[in-house]
Amino acid sequence: MRFNFIAHLRTINESDKTKAVDLLIRESTGDFDFYFFITLSVLMATLGLIANNPAIVIGSMLLAPILFPILSISLSVIMSDPILIARSTTTFLKASAVAVFTAAAATLVFSPFAPITNEILLRTEPSLIYVGVAIVAGLAVSYSLAQPALSATLPGIAVSVALIPPLATIGIGIANLDIQVATGAFTLYLVNVLGIIFSSMFIFAFMNLYTKRKIAEKIVKKEDCRVEKENEVAEKSTNHA
């Protein structure tokens, strides 16, 4: 009997689809925790790249939540939701900027004008292989989001797609005034991001996630209100200190 993958995607439980949408929007919310972990992950990646230590670099990928706003961009395009598109894109761009700034600052503090290591060079040479990896990773992570039994695979997928190391390498290149390193890493990062976006759009479309637009809008409002309240509390605490 022939296995029909697209038919299988369309038969995924509706509650699991709703949970996937909820998870994507919550995890792509640009709150304090999100940017804090972006900062920690890129700091670890930068130190690992400078030290030429692949184990540290791999560990940094497990901390980074940057994959979620990228997937949220895919979801928002499928839903044709301009508010969610703007929200996801803004969070993604801010996270990328924070990561590059952190990497550049860490490089200047810990190892200004240090030699370019092999780990750094690996992130400056984009190729068709990386395009394939990004596409496969996008397919895998978008599919596993709606499959609770596969949620344990998400950390492994985050490692395989390697979004944080190229960002850290961009920062290192900028700090060292090495345009070749910075542009090579930026190209690799862009390839990874676009590969994930387009492949996950394919999965989300055949899952019929566009039918969850109303649910997504409610979750966005809820999350934005939560962040606004947290910011108000933090501001009051600062003023009283």
Image (tube, helix red, strand yellow):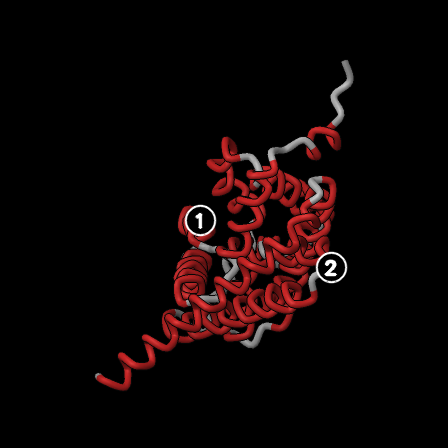
Name the quadrant of the N terminus: top right
Q: Is residue 48 left or right of residue 220?
A: left
Query: What residue sits 37% from the left and 70% below the top?
Result: 230
Residue 33 in the image: above or below residue 5: below
| Residue behind mark 1 | 62
Q: In which quadrant is the C terminus drawn?
A: bottom left
Helix, strand or loop at mark 1: helix
Q: Earlier in the sequence, mark 2 or mark 1?
A: 1
Q: Which residue in the protein does label 2 denote?
A: 80
Drawn side of residue 98 relative to residue 125, left or right: left
Across and down, in percent, residue 53 comes to: 42, 51
Image height of 7 relative to 79, above or below: above
| Residue lying farthest to the top in this orientation | 1
**Disc 2 or disc 1, which is closer to the eye?**
2
- Identified at 46% across, 55% down, the residue is 64
User: For the residue marked with disc 1, what is the amino acid?
Assistant: Leu
Q: Residues within 10 Å of mark 2 (few under 14, many from 20)?
A: few
Task: Give percent across and percent down for residue 213.
Answer: 66, 54
Question: CA separation, marks 2 and 1?
Answer: 31 Å
User: Within the image, what quadrant is residue 87 found in?
Assistant: bottom right
Percent from the top left, x then y, of residue 15? 56, 39
Q: Position of residue 76 (x, y in %)?
A: 67, 58
Q: Amino acid at mark 2?
A: Ser
Q: Secondary structure at mark 2?
A: loop
